[in-house]
Image (tube, rainbow, N blue to C red):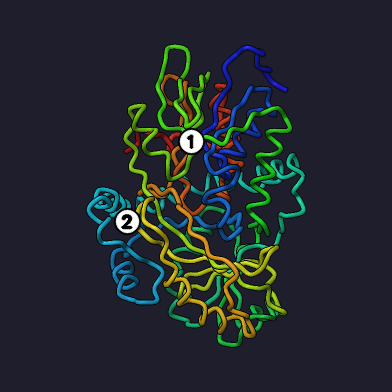
Amino acid sequence: MNGAALAGEAPIVVIGAGAVGASSALALVAAGHRVTLLDPRGPCGGTSYGNAGGIHIGAIQPFASPGVLWSALKMLADPQGPLLIDWRYLPRMLPWFARFLMNANARQMAKNAADTAAINHTAVTAWRHAAAMAGVSDHLHEVGWLKVYDREQDFLSAATERQLMQDNGFPFEVLDAAALHDLEPALGPSLTHGMLQPGSLFVDNPGRVVRALAEAAIAHGAEFRKEEVRSVRLTDSGCVLQTSSGEVHAQKVVLAAGAWSRTLAAQMGYKVPLDTERGYHVMLPSPARNLGRPVLYGRRRFVMCPMEEGLRVTACVEFAGLERGPDYRRIEKLLPFAATLLPGLDTRIQSRWLGFRPSLPDGIPVIDSVADGRVVFAFGHGHLGLTQGPATAAAVLALVQGRPAPFPLDSYRADRF
Protein backbone atom coordinates (compact mmCIF):
# COMPACT_ATOMS: atom_id res chain seq x y z
CA MET A 1 0.00 0.00 0.00
CA ASN A 2 1.14 3.55 -0.73
CA GLY A 3 1.05 6.31 1.88
CA ALA A 4 -0.95 4.52 4.57
CA ALA A 5 -3.13 6.94 6.55
CA LEU A 6 -2.46 7.78 10.19
CA ALA A 7 -4.99 6.22 12.55
CA GLY A 8 -6.22 9.59 13.85
CA GLU A 9 -6.32 11.35 10.50
CA ALA A 10 -9.68 12.41 9.11
CA PRO A 11 -10.77 10.10 6.30
CA ILE A 12 -11.30 10.77 2.64
CA VAL A 13 -15.07 10.79 2.35
CA VAL A 14 -16.54 9.46 -0.88
CA ILE A 15 -20.09 10.69 -1.46
CA GLY A 16 -22.00 8.19 -3.59
CA ALA A 17 -21.70 4.40 -3.81
CA GLY A 18 -22.56 3.81 -7.45
CA ALA A 19 -20.09 2.58 -10.05
CA VAL A 20 -17.90 5.69 -9.79
CA GLY A 21 -18.03 6.11 -6.03
CA ALA A 22 -17.61 2.43 -5.14
CA SER A 23 -14.70 2.12 -7.57
CA SER A 24 -13.10 5.25 -6.14
CA ALA A 25 -13.46 4.03 -2.56
CA LEU A 26 -11.86 0.71 -3.50
CA ALA A 27 -8.96 2.36 -5.34
CA LEU A 28 -8.30 4.78 -2.48
CA VAL A 29 -8.45 2.28 0.38
CA ALA A 30 -6.33 -0.24 -1.55
CA ALA A 31 -3.68 2.48 -1.91
CA GLY A 32 -3.57 2.98 1.86
CA HIS A 33 -5.98 5.86 2.40
CA ARG A 34 -8.52 5.94 5.20
CA VAL A 35 -11.94 6.06 3.50
CA THR A 36 -15.55 6.59 4.52
CA LEU A 37 -18.20 5.86 1.87
CA LEU A 38 -21.59 7.57 2.21
CA ASP A 39 -24.80 6.87 0.30
CA PRO A 40 -28.42 7.15 1.51
CA ARG A 41 -29.59 4.30 -0.73
CA GLY A 42 -26.83 1.83 0.07
CA PRO A 43 -24.18 0.48 -2.33
CA CYS A 44 -25.48 0.50 -5.90
CA GLY A 45 -28.88 1.69 -4.76
CA GLY A 46 -29.24 4.18 -7.60
CA THR A 47 -28.58 4.51 -11.31
CA SER A 48 -25.73 1.99 -11.52
CA TYR A 49 -28.14 -0.81 -10.61
CA GLY A 50 -30.44 -0.59 -13.60
CA ASN A 51 -28.30 0.02 -16.67
CA ALA A 52 -27.78 -2.15 -19.74
CA GLY A 53 -24.63 -3.79 -18.37
CA GLY A 54 -22.39 -2.60 -21.16
CA ILE A 55 -18.78 -1.59 -20.65
CA HIS A 56 -19.37 0.02 -23.99
CA ILE A 57 -16.05 1.57 -24.92
CA GLY A 58 -17.11 2.40 -28.48
CA ALA A 59 -19.96 4.65 -27.30
CA ILE A 60 -18.14 7.89 -28.01
CA GLN A 61 -20.52 9.82 -30.27
CA PRO A 62 -21.96 12.68 -28.21
CA PHE A 63 -25.71 13.16 -28.22
CA ALA A 64 -24.93 16.79 -29.06
CA SER A 65 -24.16 16.23 -32.76
CA PRO A 66 -25.10 18.02 -35.99
CA GLY A 67 -28.76 17.51 -36.80
CA VAL A 68 -29.72 16.58 -33.23
CA LEU A 69 -32.41 19.25 -32.96
CA TRP A 70 -34.34 17.90 -35.94
CA SER A 71 -33.88 14.33 -34.73
CA ALA A 72 -35.13 15.28 -31.26
CA LEU A 73 -38.24 16.95 -32.66
CA LYS A 74 -39.07 13.82 -34.66
CA MET A 75 -38.59 11.63 -31.60
CA LEU A 76 -40.78 13.88 -29.48
CA ALA A 77 -43.53 13.71 -32.12
CA ASP A 78 -43.44 9.90 -32.12
CA PRO A 79 -45.77 8.45 -29.43
CA GLN A 80 -43.48 5.40 -29.30
CA GLY A 81 -40.24 7.37 -29.55
CA PRO A 82 -37.39 7.16 -27.02
CA LEU A 83 -37.36 10.86 -26.01
CA LEU A 84 -39.77 12.48 -23.54
CA ILE A 85 -39.91 15.93 -21.96
CA ASP A 86 -42.07 16.99 -19.05
CA TRP A 87 -43.04 20.44 -20.35
CA ARG A 88 -43.46 21.67 -16.77
CA TYR A 89 -39.74 21.04 -16.30
CA LEU A 90 -38.69 22.67 -19.58
CA PRO A 91 -38.08 26.20 -18.21
CA ARG A 92 -35.53 24.80 -15.79
CA MET A 93 -33.88 22.80 -18.60
CA LEU A 94 -33.56 25.69 -21.08
CA PRO A 95 -30.04 26.78 -19.99
CA TRP A 96 -28.90 23.13 -20.21
CA PHE A 97 -30.42 22.75 -23.68
CA ALA A 98 -28.77 25.99 -24.84
CA ARG A 99 -25.35 24.68 -23.82
CA PHE A 100 -26.19 21.33 -25.38
CA LEU A 101 -26.94 22.93 -28.75
CA MET A 102 -23.69 24.93 -28.56
CA ASN A 103 -21.93 21.55 -28.68
CA ALA A 104 -23.99 20.25 -31.62
CA ASN A 105 -21.54 21.13 -34.38
CA ALA A 106 -18.97 19.01 -36.20
CA ARG A 107 -15.89 20.53 -34.57
CA GLN A 108 -17.16 20.24 -31.01
CA MET A 109 -18.61 16.80 -31.65
CA ALA A 110 -15.20 15.54 -32.80
CA LYS A 111 -13.49 17.02 -29.74
CA ASN A 112 -16.04 15.61 -27.29
CA ALA A 113 -15.81 12.20 -28.95
CA ALA A 114 -12.01 12.25 -28.63
CA ASP A 115 -12.26 13.22 -24.96
CA THR A 116 -14.68 10.37 -24.32
CA ALA A 117 -12.38 8.00 -26.22
CA ALA A 118 -9.46 8.96 -23.96
CA ILE A 119 -11.12 7.60 -20.84
CA ASN A 120 -12.82 4.71 -22.64
CA HIS A 121 -9.48 3.40 -23.92
CA THR A 122 -8.53 2.76 -20.28
CA ALA A 123 -11.91 1.34 -19.23
CA VAL A 124 -11.46 -2.38 -19.93
CA THR A 125 -8.11 -2.63 -18.16
CA ALA A 126 -9.47 -0.67 -15.20
CA TRP A 127 -12.55 -2.89 -15.00
CA ARG A 128 -10.54 -6.11 -15.12
CA HIS A 129 -8.39 -4.88 -12.26
CA ALA A 130 -11.35 -3.74 -10.14
CA ALA A 131 -13.36 -6.90 -10.82
CA ALA A 132 -10.40 -9.07 -9.84
CA MET A 133 -10.03 -7.18 -6.55
CA ALA A 134 -13.75 -7.62 -5.87
CA GLY A 135 -13.87 -11.29 -6.92
CA VAL A 136 -16.44 -10.77 -9.69
CA SER A 137 -14.37 -11.32 -12.82
CA ASP A 138 -16.73 -14.13 -13.83
CA HIS A 139 -19.50 -11.53 -14.32
CA LEU A 140 -17.51 -9.73 -17.04
CA HIS A 141 -18.05 -11.26 -20.47
CA GLU A 142 -15.97 -10.48 -23.56
CA VAL A 143 -18.87 -10.60 -25.99
CA GLY A 144 -18.90 -7.06 -27.38
CA TRP A 145 -21.81 -4.72 -28.04
CA LEU A 146 -24.21 -5.28 -30.94
CA LYS A 147 -26.37 -2.71 -32.70
CA VAL A 148 -28.99 -3.97 -35.15
CA TYR A 149 -31.21 -2.48 -37.85
CA ASP A 150 -34.21 -3.56 -39.87
CA ARG A 151 -33.99 -0.68 -42.37
CA GLU A 152 -31.02 0.26 -44.50
CA GLN A 153 -31.76 3.96 -44.05
CA ASP A 154 -31.24 3.65 -40.28
CA PHE A 155 -27.96 1.79 -40.77
CA LEU A 156 -26.73 4.44 -43.21
CA SER A 157 -27.76 7.27 -40.89
CA ALA A 158 -25.37 5.88 -38.24
CA ALA A 159 -22.33 6.43 -40.49
CA THR A 160 -21.05 9.27 -38.27
CA GLU A 161 -21.01 6.98 -35.24
CA ARG A 162 -18.92 4.42 -37.11
CA GLN A 163 -16.58 7.08 -38.48
CA LEU A 164 -15.92 8.46 -35.00
CA MET A 165 -15.14 4.98 -33.74
CA GLN A 166 -12.73 4.45 -36.61
CA ASP A 167 -11.08 7.84 -36.10
CA ASN A 168 -10.56 7.15 -32.40
CA GLY A 169 -9.23 3.61 -32.61
CA PHE A 170 -12.24 1.45 -31.73
CA PRO A 171 -12.55 -1.47 -34.18
CA PHE A 172 -15.97 -2.66 -35.25
CA GLU A 173 -17.44 -5.20 -37.63
CA VAL A 174 -20.29 -4.54 -40.06
CA LEU A 175 -22.59 -7.56 -40.36
CA ASP A 176 -24.98 -8.46 -43.13
CA ALA A 177 -28.17 -10.39 -42.37
CA ALA A 178 -26.51 -13.79 -42.63
CA ALA A 179 -23.57 -12.89 -40.38
CA LEU A 180 -25.89 -11.20 -37.92
CA HIS A 181 -28.08 -14.27 -37.53
CA ASP A 182 -25.05 -16.55 -37.32
CA LEU A 183 -23.87 -14.45 -34.39
CA GLU A 184 -27.30 -14.20 -32.71
CA PRO A 185 -29.55 -17.04 -33.96
CA ALA A 186 -32.38 -16.05 -31.63
CA LEU A 187 -32.96 -12.73 -33.43
CA GLY A 188 -35.92 -12.48 -35.78
CA PRO A 189 -35.69 -12.44 -39.60
CA SER A 190 -36.64 -8.77 -40.01
CA LEU A 191 -33.14 -7.58 -39.10
CA THR A 192 -30.90 -6.88 -42.07
CA HIS A 193 -27.82 -5.04 -40.75
CA GLY A 194 -25.65 -5.13 -37.67
CA MET A 195 -22.60 -3.47 -36.17
CA LEU A 196 -20.54 -5.33 -33.57
CA GLN A 197 -18.04 -3.51 -31.38
CA PRO A 198 -15.99 -6.48 -30.13
CA GLY A 199 -13.79 -4.63 -27.64
CA SER A 200 -16.66 -3.94 -25.25
CA LEU A 201 -17.48 -6.11 -22.24
CA PHE A 202 -20.84 -7.10 -20.78
CA VAL A 203 -21.71 -7.22 -17.07
CA ASP A 204 -24.53 -9.70 -16.52
CA ASN A 205 -25.57 -8.30 -13.12
CA PRO A 206 -24.51 -4.66 -12.63
CA GLY A 207 -26.13 -4.46 -9.20
CA ARG A 208 -24.24 -7.47 -7.89
CA VAL A 209 -20.94 -6.32 -9.41
CA VAL A 210 -21.05 -2.71 -8.18
CA ARG A 211 -22.10 -3.86 -4.71
CA ALA A 212 -19.10 -6.21 -4.77
CA LEU A 213 -16.81 -3.23 -5.45
CA ALA A 214 -18.19 -1.46 -2.39
CA GLU A 215 -17.93 -4.64 -0.29
CA ALA A 216 -14.31 -5.08 -1.40
CA ALA A 217 -13.57 -1.51 -0.30
CA ILE A 218 -15.10 -2.29 3.10
CA ALA A 219 -13.10 -5.52 3.32
CA HIS A 220 -9.94 -3.45 2.71
CA GLY A 221 -10.85 -1.18 5.63
CA ALA A 222 -13.28 1.44 4.31
CA GLU A 223 -16.22 2.42 6.49
CA PHE A 224 -19.69 2.54 4.91
CA ARG A 225 -22.50 4.67 6.30
CA LYS A 226 -26.03 4.75 4.90
CA GLU A 227 -26.41 8.51 5.24
CA GLU A 228 -27.51 11.41 3.08
CA VAL A 229 -25.06 14.29 2.75
CA ARG A 230 -27.07 17.50 3.07
CA SER A 231 -24.30 20.07 2.98
CA VAL A 232 -20.54 20.41 2.60
CA ARG A 233 -18.53 23.21 4.21
CA LEU A 234 -14.90 23.83 3.34
CA THR A 235 -12.48 24.44 6.22
CA ASP A 236 -8.79 25.29 6.40
CA SER A 237 -7.93 21.64 7.09
CA GLY A 238 -10.50 19.84 4.94
CA CYS A 239 -14.29 19.66 4.87
CA VAL A 240 -17.20 19.28 7.27
CA LEU A 241 -20.20 17.37 5.98
CA GLN A 242 -23.64 17.64 7.52
CA THR A 243 -25.37 14.31 7.01
CA SER A 244 -28.71 12.85 7.99
CA SER A 245 -26.96 11.48 11.10
CA GLY A 246 -24.73 14.39 12.12
CA GLU A 247 -21.37 15.90 11.24
CA VAL A 248 -18.56 14.10 9.43
CA HIS A 249 -15.10 15.64 9.27
CA ALA A 250 -13.08 14.84 6.16
CA GLN A 251 -9.50 15.34 5.09
CA LYS A 252 -10.75 15.36 1.48
CA VAL A 253 -14.08 14.72 -0.24
CA VAL A 254 -14.72 12.82 -3.46
CA LEU A 255 -18.06 13.97 -4.84
CA ALA A 256 -19.45 11.07 -6.89
CA ALA A 257 -23.15 11.44 -6.17
CA GLY A 258 -24.27 11.27 -9.79
CA ALA A 259 -27.31 13.38 -10.61
CA TRP A 260 -27.42 14.60 -6.98
CA SER A 261 -23.97 16.21 -7.21
CA ARG A 262 -25.05 19.62 -8.51
CA THR A 263 -26.36 21.02 -5.21
CA LEU A 264 -23.31 19.95 -3.22
CA ALA A 265 -20.96 21.33 -5.87
CA ALA A 266 -22.81 24.65 -5.77
CA GLN A 267 -22.34 24.84 -2.00
CA MET A 268 -18.61 24.81 -2.66
CA GLY A 269 -18.87 27.59 -5.22
CA TYR A 270 -19.03 25.55 -8.44
CA LYS A 271 -22.07 26.04 -10.66
CA VAL A 272 -21.90 23.00 -12.90
CA PRO A 273 -24.75 22.61 -15.46
CA LEU A 274 -25.61 19.09 -14.36
CA ASP A 275 -29.08 17.68 -14.93
CA THR A 276 -30.59 14.23 -15.31
CA GLU A 277 -31.68 12.07 -18.21
CA ARG A 278 -34.15 9.69 -16.64
CA GLY A 279 -33.97 6.14 -17.99
CA TYR A 280 -36.19 3.10 -17.53
CA HIS A 281 -35.96 -0.65 -17.60
CA VAL A 282 -38.34 -3.57 -17.33
CA MET A 283 -37.32 -7.11 -16.46
CA LEU A 284 -38.81 -10.01 -18.42
CA PRO A 285 -38.34 -13.77 -18.05
CA SER A 286 -35.27 -15.20 -19.77
CA PRO A 287 -36.24 -16.42 -23.26
CA ALA A 288 -35.82 -20.07 -24.18
CA ARG A 289 -33.57 -18.88 -27.02
CA ASN A 290 -31.63 -16.08 -25.42
CA LEU A 291 -29.14 -13.51 -26.64
CA GLY A 292 -25.41 -13.78 -26.13
CA ARG A 293 -24.79 -10.06 -25.57
CA PRO A 294 -26.63 -6.74 -25.26
CA VAL A 295 -28.46 -5.85 -28.47
CA LEU A 296 -29.37 -2.24 -29.25
CA TYR A 297 -32.18 -1.76 -31.75
CA GLY A 298 -31.13 1.22 -33.83
CA ARG A 299 -34.55 2.44 -34.92
CA ARG A 300 -36.36 2.45 -31.57
CA ARG A 301 -33.19 2.89 -29.49
CA PHE A 302 -33.82 0.34 -26.79
CA VAL A 303 -31.46 -2.37 -25.55
CA MET A 304 -32.25 -6.02 -24.80
CA CYS A 305 -29.82 -7.36 -22.20
CA PRO A 306 -29.51 -11.05 -21.23
CA MET A 307 -29.01 -10.50 -17.51
CA GLU A 308 -28.39 -13.13 -14.85
CA GLU A 309 -31.93 -12.69 -13.49
CA GLY A 310 -33.81 -12.37 -16.80
CA LEU A 311 -34.02 -10.28 -19.95
CA ARG A 312 -33.72 -6.56 -19.24
CA VAL A 313 -35.15 -4.05 -21.71
CA THR A 314 -33.71 -0.56 -21.17
CA ALA A 315 -34.95 2.54 -22.95
CA CYS A 316 -35.93 6.18 -22.91
CA VAL A 317 -34.36 9.55 -22.29
CA GLU A 318 -36.79 11.57 -20.20
CA PHE A 319 -36.19 15.12 -19.02
CA ALA A 320 -38.33 15.59 -15.92
CA GLY A 321 -35.91 16.20 -13.04
CA LEU A 322 -35.30 14.27 -9.86
CA GLU A 323 -38.63 14.73 -8.11
CA ARG A 324 -41.34 13.51 -10.48
CA GLY A 325 -42.46 9.90 -10.15
CA PRO A 326 -41.96 7.26 -12.85
CA ASP A 327 -44.11 6.88 -15.94
CA TYR A 328 -43.62 3.39 -17.38
CA ARG A 329 -46.10 3.71 -20.24
CA ARG A 330 -43.52 4.60 -22.90
CA ILE A 331 -41.15 1.72 -22.22
CA GLU A 332 -44.05 -0.72 -22.03
CA LYS A 333 -45.12 0.39 -25.51
CA LEU A 334 -41.76 -0.87 -26.80
CA LEU A 335 -42.30 -4.46 -25.73
CA PRO A 336 -44.15 -5.50 -28.94
CA PHE A 337 -41.09 -4.36 -30.90
CA ALA A 338 -38.85 -6.41 -28.61
CA ALA A 339 -41.08 -9.45 -29.24
CA THR A 340 -40.67 -8.95 -32.99
CA LEU A 341 -36.89 -8.78 -32.67
CA LEU A 342 -36.78 -11.80 -30.36
CA PRO A 343 -39.53 -14.22 -31.46
CA GLY A 344 -41.15 -16.15 -28.64
CA LEU A 345 -40.27 -13.52 -26.05
CA ASP A 346 -42.43 -13.66 -22.93
CA THR A 347 -43.33 -10.00 -22.34
CA ARG A 348 -44.82 -10.46 -18.87
CA ILE A 349 -43.13 -7.79 -16.76
CA GLN A 350 -41.43 -9.04 -13.61
CA SER A 351 -40.25 -5.65 -12.36
CA ARG A 352 -39.93 -2.01 -13.42
CA TRP A 353 -37.25 0.56 -12.62
CA LEU A 354 -36.44 4.24 -13.08
CA GLY A 355 -32.92 5.68 -12.84
CA PHE A 356 -31.33 9.13 -13.14
CA ARG A 357 -28.39 9.51 -15.49
CA PRO A 358 -26.19 12.47 -14.44
CA SER A 359 -25.73 14.40 -17.67
CA LEU A 360 -23.72 17.42 -18.73
CA PRO A 361 -24.41 19.32 -21.97
CA ASP A 362 -21.17 18.29 -23.68
CA GLY A 363 -21.48 14.63 -22.62
CA ILE A 364 -18.12 14.73 -20.79
CA PRO A 365 -17.92 14.05 -17.02
CA VAL A 366 -16.30 16.35 -14.51
CA ILE A 367 -13.16 14.76 -13.06
CA ASP A 368 -11.20 17.48 -11.30
CA SER A 369 -9.44 18.51 -8.11
CA VAL A 370 -10.98 21.71 -6.74
CA ALA A 371 -10.97 23.85 -3.59
CA ASP A 372 -7.18 23.71 -3.31
CA GLY A 373 -7.20 19.93 -3.40
CA ARG A 374 -9.75 19.46 -0.63
CA VAL A 375 -12.38 18.11 -3.03
CA VAL A 376 -12.31 15.86 -6.10
CA PHE A 377 -15.28 16.00 -8.44
CA ALA A 378 -16.18 12.74 -10.22
CA PHE A 379 -19.67 13.00 -11.67
CA GLY A 380 -21.64 13.64 -14.85
CA HIS A 381 -20.94 10.39 -16.71
CA GLY A 382 -24.33 10.30 -18.43
CA HIS A 383 -24.95 6.93 -20.09
CA LEU A 384 -21.40 5.74 -19.37
CA GLY A 385 -21.19 5.56 -15.58
CA LEU A 386 -20.72 1.80 -15.56
CA THR A 387 -18.27 1.91 -18.47
CA GLN A 388 -16.14 4.65 -16.95
CA GLY A 389 -16.43 3.89 -13.21
CA PRO A 390 -13.09 2.16 -12.46
CA ALA A 391 -11.25 4.32 -15.04
CA THR A 392 -12.55 7.41 -13.26
CA ALA A 393 -11.45 5.90 -9.95
CA ALA A 394 -7.89 5.61 -11.27
CA ALA A 395 -7.99 9.32 -12.10
CA VAL A 396 -9.47 10.15 -8.67
CA LEU A 397 -6.63 8.30 -6.96
CA ALA A 398 -4.08 10.16 -9.10
CA LEU A 399 -5.64 13.52 -8.21
CA VAL A 400 -5.65 12.68 -4.50
CA GLN A 401 -2.01 11.62 -4.65
CA GLY A 402 -0.92 14.52 -6.86
CA ARG A 403 0.37 12.45 -9.74
CA PRO A 404 -0.57 12.20 -13.46
CA ALA A 405 -3.82 10.43 -14.29
CA PRO A 406 -3.99 7.52 -16.77
CA PHE A 407 -5.56 9.89 -19.34
CA PRO A 408 -5.36 13.69 -19.78
CA LEU A 409 -7.81 15.55 -17.54
CA ASP A 410 -7.81 19.07 -19.02
CA SER A 411 -11.11 18.51 -20.85
CA TYR A 412 -12.78 17.20 -17.68
CA ARG A 413 -12.25 20.35 -15.60
CA ALA A 414 -15.12 21.75 -13.56
CA ASP A 415 -14.48 25.32 -14.71
CA ARG A 416 -14.82 24.56 -18.44
CA PHE A 417 -18.38 25.85 -18.36
Tell me if residue 189 comes above or below residue 325 in the rendering. Answer: below
Left or right of 104, for residue 201: right
Quarter placement of the C terminus: top left
Density class for disc 1 (Cα within 10 Å; few <14, some 14-19, many ≥20) is: some
Q: Give the CA distance from mark 2 to mark 1.
A: 36 Å
Which residue matches tag 1?
A: 228
Q: Nearer the viewer, residue 327 or 156?
A: 327
Left or right of 320, for residue 119: right
Amino acid type shown at disc 1: Glu
Which residue matches tag 2?
A: 104
Residue at disc 1, secondary structure: loop
| Residue depicted at x 63% and y 52% | 207
Sequence-first tag of 2 and 1: 2
Quarter placement of the N terminus: top right
Q: Position of residue 123 (x, y in %)?
A: 61, 46
Quarter where residue 131 is shown: top right
Closer to viewer: mark 2 or mark 1: 1
Q: Position of residue 39 (x, y in %)?
A: 54, 38
Density class for disc 2 (Cα within 10 Å; few <14, some 14-19, many ≥20) is: many
| Residue depicted at x 45% and y 68% | 328
Q: Residue furthest left?
A: 91
| Residue depicted at x 61% and y 81% | 342
Residue at disc 2, secondary structure: loop
Tell me if residue 138 comes above or below residue 153 in the rendering. Answer: above
Q: Position of residue 296 (x, y in %)?
A: 54, 69
Q: Position of residue 100 (x, y in %)?
A: 31, 52
Tell me if residue 166 comes above or below residue 210 in the rendering. Answer: below
Amino acid type shown at disc 2: Ala
